[in-house]
Image: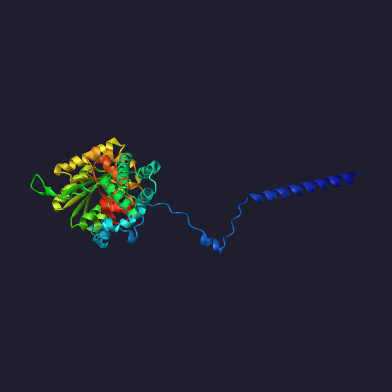
Amino acid sequence: MDIVILVVVIAVVAVAAISGLVVALRGKQAGKQVPPSPPADDETATRTAPPAEPHVGDEAAPPAEEERRRTIEDVTLPADEAAAAEAEAPPVPVEVPEPTAGRLVRLRARLARSQNSLGRGLLTLLSRERLDDDTWDEIEDTLITADVGVGPTQELVGRLRERVRVLGTRTPDELRALLREELLALIGTDLDRVVHTEGGISETGEERPAVVLVVGVNGTGKTTTTGKLARVLVADGKSVVLGAADTFRAAAADQLQTWGQRVGARTVRGPEGGDPASVAFDAVREGITEGADVVLVDTAGRLHTKTGLMDELGKVKRVVEKQGPVNEVLLVLDATTGQNGLVQARVFSEVVDVTGIALTKLDGTAKGGIVVAVQRELGVPVKLVGLGEGPDDLAPFDAEAFVDALLD
């Protein structure tokens, strides 16, 4: 029995020893580093080498042949590129503007389409069998809606009522002739509507060009009107210099220069944000040097509520007058603004003594009565009207052609 127990103990000890030996061998194998297996061919192709460290001093590699230092003759400066591009660019063709004679007559149909509601409404009301107080009230409303203004409307209606009552005018043709006469009297046929572009002689004995200042609020088409006016003057055989004194709007000078290039007129401009009075002065000096007939100065679009800017506009006029009088101050008004345009007109006239009105976008509104209202407000005539987007759609204003368009 003792022998059996001894054999069992010896067997257990042997098994334990063998187990410990196995665990020790496995631990040694886990501690060894297993070398990585070699990469496949495609892995070698895609693997990139780590970036090399930058070299300094004597270790720096010599530059490649194409990267060696170039001489000044080999370098093309940006200014040289611009000059080369300008030299290669084809010259802007000089256009021959359409003659101004008869422009308003040609555009009469366009004007009639935009204003026919006014004339047609008046003729329809006057053609009623019975012209009672209600009808005359409707006539007043039609005229006021067309921005004729309360005062001029009351005058016109009062004269019409009296003449219809006394003369007993009833036929459509008679009524049309009667209305035409009264509208012409209201607009005025004896006003001086010529844009004065006659030069003179300076104090130093030099021939001085006529100077025309173009003023107005932003958005009325002031710069465009200046460019179109240049076309009108060139069409009449005059040489023109343009002054881009609107230095606060980045595109204004470029826009004006484009208009000038199209008719061969030189544009004098200054740096963006520069002194407008200085640009205007230089433009007049350039006009004297070149012997030009007219200098057109496009001023910055002033908000009539900005006192400082309006004062600066007065400064432009004073600086220009150091070389001679200003022949015209044209105020550009947008016909679609209606009565608000009268507020603008009043303030501008106080600052620069407006001598004439250029009424733009007249074909885009049925409120043609603004012609009457603005003349009554300022006591100055409408001299130019814009009737479209075309370059030759600026025309001298003609009262008879305008009234005929209303009643067409």
State the residue in front, 78 or 307. 307
Against 104, residue 316 (above or below) is: above
Residue 236 placement, left or right of 109: left
State the residue in front, 88 or 292. 292
Percent position (x, y) of residue 145? Answer: 37, 44
Image quadrant in which the N terminus is located: top right
Percent position (x, y) of residue 208? Answer: 13, 49
The answer to whether residue 248 is seen in the rendering is no
Percent position (x, y) of residue 372? Answer: 29, 44
Tell me which colouring the rendered structure shows.
rainbow
Q: Residue furthest top?
A: 307
Residue 350 placement, left or right of 47: left
Report the residue at 78% width, 46% height from top. Answer: 16
Q: Residue furthest right?
A: 1
State the residue in front, 299 or 353. 353
The number of numbered badges drawn on the structure is 0
Q: Quadrant of residue 376?
A: top left
Q: Quadrant of residue 348?
A: top left
The answer to whether residue 206 is seen in the rendering is yes
Q: Quadrant of residue 60?
A: bottom left
Percent position (x, y) of residue 246? Answer: 27, 46
Residue 325 placement, left or right of 70: left
Image quadrant in which the C terminus is located: bottom left
Report the residue at 73% width, 49% height from top. Answer: 21
State the residue in front, 326 or 50. 326
